[in-house]
Image (cartoon, helix red, strand yellow):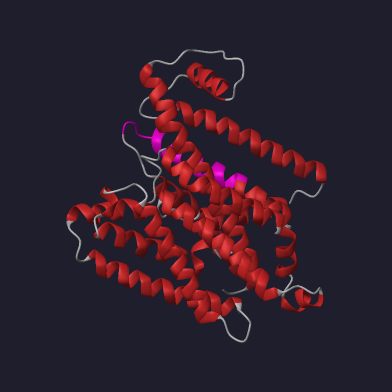
Amino acid sequence: MIQTVKGKGLFFFSLCAALLFLVLISLHAGAISVPFGVVLHEVCRGLDLPSFGQMPTADQFSVFWYIRMPRIVVALLCGAALAAAGAVMQGVFSNPLADPGIIGVSSGASFGAVICISLGLTSVSLYYMPAFALGGAIFAVIITVLLTFRHGKIPPMSLLLAGVAVSIFLGAMTNGLLTFMNEYRLKEFLFWTVGGLDYRRWDHVALSFAPIIAGLVTLIVLARHLNVLSLGETEAKSLGMNILWYRSLFLFISSFITAVAVCTSGMIGFVGLVVPHMMRILIGPDHRLLIPSSALFGAFFLLLCDTIGRALLPPLEIRVGIITALLGAPYFLYLIRRMRKEGGAM
C-alpha cells in the first residue's frame, strides 16, 4: 500500500498520464488505422492548441471525430461510473465482493431493455433503449429498498438478500419475454447483454455525460461520510451520523450512475468488482482517495479492454464485455481464494 502523501500524489499523476497515453493509442488503433500524426494534429486542434503533425484525409477525419472519439468518451464515462459505484457499494456493505449490480440494477436494466426491444421501439429512436433500461434499473432499486426498509432502517444484509431475490425475479421475467421474441430481436438483446461500445455516438455522450459527472463529483464530496459509515453503525451513531439518510443517498447515487452506464453501454461485468478492490490494495481504504482513484482506473481499464477488443483481430471486433470478463474473472477467483485463506471460510 502507498503510504506517503508524495507517493499518493505520484500515483494519481501516473494514472492520469497512463490514461492520456491510452487515449492516444485508442484513437490510433482499430480496423481503420489513424496515423499518430493525424491523432496529434486533431487532438491539438480540438484543444485549441498550436497544431502540428499530419492533416487527416476525409475518411480519417470522420473516423476520428464521429466513431473513435465518442466511443472513447463513453468508455471513460462508463468505466469511471461502474468502478466508483463499486467502491461505494463495497464501502456501504463492508464487503469487497459487492458490486454495483448487487441490489438489482443490472437485472432491472435488462428487464427494461427487453421490454423496449419486444415493443420494437429501438428502431424508432436512439433514446428509447436507454430510457427503458434506466427506468427498469431505478424500478429494481426502489423495489429492493422498499422490501428492506423496516422501522427506519435499511440493514445491509437484508438489502443484499432482497437484491438477489429481485434480480432472480426480474431475470425470470426477462427470460419469459425472450421466449416470445423473433430471432432478430433476440439477437439484438443478446448483443446488449454482452456489453459493447460499438456504434456509440455523440448522442450517447450527451445522454451520459452530465448525470455521470454529477454523480461522481457528489460521491467524491461525500466520501468522508462514507468513511464514517464504513466504521459500523455503532461508531457512526456515536459520531452523530444519520445512518439511514447517508446509506440511502450513497445507494441511490451509485445505483443511478450504474444505471446510466449500463443503459449506455450494455451489461459490462467485473469493472465495479475488480477495480475498487485493486485500488484499495494500492491506495488504502480512505474513500476520499479510493473513489477518485477507482474512477480513474475504471476509465483506464474499460478503455484498455475496448482497445484490445478492437485491435486484437482486425477487422473483427471482440466486444468489451467479453474482454472485461476474460481479464476480471481470474482476479475474482484469486480474490475468493485469498479471502478463504485469510478468513478460513467464506
| Viewer-proximal residue among 304 and 342 | 304
Q: Residue at x 61, y 44 (%)?
A: 296
Q: Residue furthest left?
A: 182
Q: Is residue 212 left or right of residue 2?
A: left
Q: Residue at x 48, y 31 (%)?
A: 26
The C terminus is located in which quarter? bottom right
Residue 254 found in image quarter: bottom right
Q: Which residues are magenta?
A: 296-315
Residue 97 showing in the rendered view: no
Q: Residue furthest bottom?
A: 151
Magenta stretch: residue 306 in it? yes
Residue 230 found in image quarter: bottom right
Residue 307 found in image quarter: top left
Residue 127 position, x and y percent, is 37, 50
Q: Residue furthest front?
A: 124
Q: Is residue 198 left or right of residue 144?
A: left
Magenta stretch: residue 61 in it? no
Q: Is residue 216 above or below residue 246?
A: above
Residue 239 showing in the rendered view: yes
Residue 257 position, x and y percent, is 53, 56
Q: Residue at x 26, y 70 (%)?
A: 176
Residue 29 position, x and y percent, is 44, 28
Magenta-drawn stretch, dominant element (helix, strand or loop): helix
| Viewer-proximal residue among 162 and 311 | 162
Q: Is residue 246 left or right of residue 144?
A: right
Residue 145 position, x and y percent, is 53, 75
